[in-house]
């Protein structure tokens, strides 16, 4: 009977352990717009990557965090780099709605799940073979819009104006908003667009102010939410101005100042945590996230950072299920991970409770929103 020398046996055992160790690692790519016009959204998202789980079960998790500078072309370049060179098992990001739309084809071709912390519903609806690889960690526009339109009805609004981004975010909101107001008996009398990089919207605001609707909805996100709001006030508009959850940033309050006071928005409970009852299942999760972020950076996070943190919670739930079928680094694992994410049920996140399905890759219900108004620079809860 031939026995291998002890030294060779030890070497083989070490090689086997090294191989297992290499396999026992999950690779996640994170793309955030930490610079450029979407930076108000992307910075807290990039920062929140440091709070993502370093270990899931027995797997060490390796994160590669990249900045696409708010540019959709750069997003695609970085995405290919992560999938081809790094062979990541999933993507968290990108920050912008147009960037996420640009990514759809490539994540589907590579069969890589993408957890998108973006506003536009268009990344998941209507469901397609490409979109089935995307899981959205923000509230769908329709969920937010329902609360805003209900408030308009309650306040007797009969006419509205709309000004939104001339991209996927703005068009998605317009597509959701118009059918809802029509059903509610509210008439749209003025409709304008602007670009994220615009420095002035005087022309659009002048037209809206001249039409003098009872209310105006601004369909924008991040820092650019301030410009149309303040310009409307400067043009003498006195009606109620509504914002989407894209305005849920400290910059909106800081840069807008007194001009944005009175704004009505539906968004994450994180903005009104002090008024949310302890019975809300997301309150503790949100407080833990905020505490960890403050400890690391010395400031409170914008709600957009929580969208990335929730992506980590979704992965913590889904990865153990995927491991029952395959190992990281393989297409079989990525497919199993997609299936496990779609099977998420009643997962409590920072901003709501996720229950995914084949038809719904956002998963939030009314527990994922709060109606609020900015009063004296502080968001105050409005009972729905």
Image: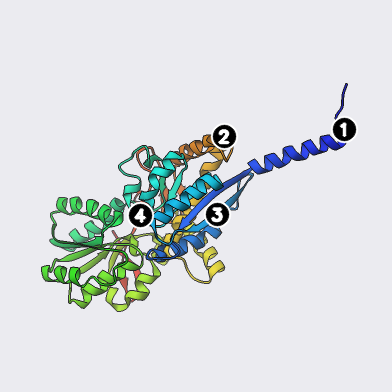
**Mark 1 vs mark 2: in front:** 1
Q: What crowding class fits label 1: few (fewer than 14 Cα within 10 Å), some (14-19), or many (20 or more)?
A: few
**Can you identify the residue that label 3 sits on?**
64
Scheme by which the image is coloured: rainbow
**Can you identify the residue that label 2 sits on?**
326
Q: Is residue 292 visible?
A: yes
First reached walking from the N terminus: tag 3 or tag 2? 3
Where 165 sits versus 258, above or below?
Answer: above
258 horizontally vs 292: left or right: left
Query: Dot 1 lies on which element?
Result: loop
Mark 4 near mark 2, Cβ–Cβ under 8 Å?
Answer: no
The quadrant where residue 255 appears? bottom left
Query: Dot 3 lies on which element?
Result: strand
Query: Dot 2 lies on which element?
Result: loop
Where 180 sits versus 151, above or below?
Answer: above
Mark 3 near mark 1, Cβ–Cβ under 8 Å?
Answer: no
The spot of residue 314 in percent (x, y) is 49, 47
Q: CA distance from mark 4 to mark 1?
A: 60 Å
Q: Residue at the location (44% across, 49% down)?
A: 115
In the image shown, does 92 or 67 lie closer to the viewer? 67
Q: Residue at the location (78% across, 37% down)?
A: 13
Query: Dot 4 lies on which element?
Result: helix
In the image shown, does 85 or 37 lie closer to the viewer? 85
**Can you identify the residue that label 4 sits on?**
97
**Can you identify the residue that label 1 sits on?**
5
Q: Report the number of discs.
A: 4
Q: CA distance from mark 1 to mark 2?
A: 34 Å
Q: CA distance from mark 4 to mark 2?
A: 31 Å
Q: CA distance from mark 3 to mark 2?
A: 22 Å
């Amino acid at each position: 009977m031939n026995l291998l020398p002890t030294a060779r046996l030890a070497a083989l055992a070490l090689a086997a352990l090294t191989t297992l160790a290499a396999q026992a690692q999950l690779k996640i790519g994170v793309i955030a717009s930490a610079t450029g016009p979407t930076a108000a959204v992307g910075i807290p998202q990039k920062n929140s990557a440091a709070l993502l789980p370093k270990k899931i079960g027995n797997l060490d998790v390796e994160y590669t965090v990249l900045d696409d500078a708010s540019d959709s072309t750069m997003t695609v370049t970085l995405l290919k780099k992560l999938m081809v060179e790094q062979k990541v098992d999933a993507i968290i990001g990108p920050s912008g709605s147009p960037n996420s739309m640009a990514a759809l084809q490539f994540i589907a071709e590579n069969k890589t799940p993408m957890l998108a912390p973006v506003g536009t519903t268009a990344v998941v609806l209507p469901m397609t073979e490409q979109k089935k690889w995307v899981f959205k960690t923000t509230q769908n526009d329709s969920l937010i819009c329902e609360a805003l339109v209900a408030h308009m009805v309650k306040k007797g609004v009969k006419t509205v104006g709309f000004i939104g981004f001339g991209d996927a975010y703005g068009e998605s909101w317009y597509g959701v908003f118009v059918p809802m107001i029509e059903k509610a008996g509210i008439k749209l009398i003025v409709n304008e667009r602007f670009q994220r990089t615009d420095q002035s919207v005087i022309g659009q605001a002048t037209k809206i102010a001249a039409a003098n609707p009872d209310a105006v909805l601004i369909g924008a996100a991040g820092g650019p939410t301030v410009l149309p709001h303040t310009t409307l006030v400067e043009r003498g508009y006195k009606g109620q101005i509504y914002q989407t959850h894209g305005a849920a940033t400290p910059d909106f309050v800081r840069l807008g100042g007194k001009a944005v006071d009175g704004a009505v928005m539906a968004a994450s409970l994180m903005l009104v945590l002090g008024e949310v009852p302890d019975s809300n299942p997301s309150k503790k999760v949100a407080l833990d996230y905020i505490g960890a972020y403050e400890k690391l950076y010395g400031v409170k996070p914008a709600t957009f950072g929580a969208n990335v943190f929730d992506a980590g919670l979704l992965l913590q739930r889904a990865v153990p299920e995927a491991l029952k079928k395959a190992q990281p680094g393989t297409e079989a694992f990525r497919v199993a991970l997609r299936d496990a994410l779609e099977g998420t049920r009643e997962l409590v996140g920072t901003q709501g409770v996720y229950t995914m399905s084949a038809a719904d890759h956002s998963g939030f219900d009314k527990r994922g929103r709060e109606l609020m108004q900015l009063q004296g620079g502080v968001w105050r809860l409005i009972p729905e």
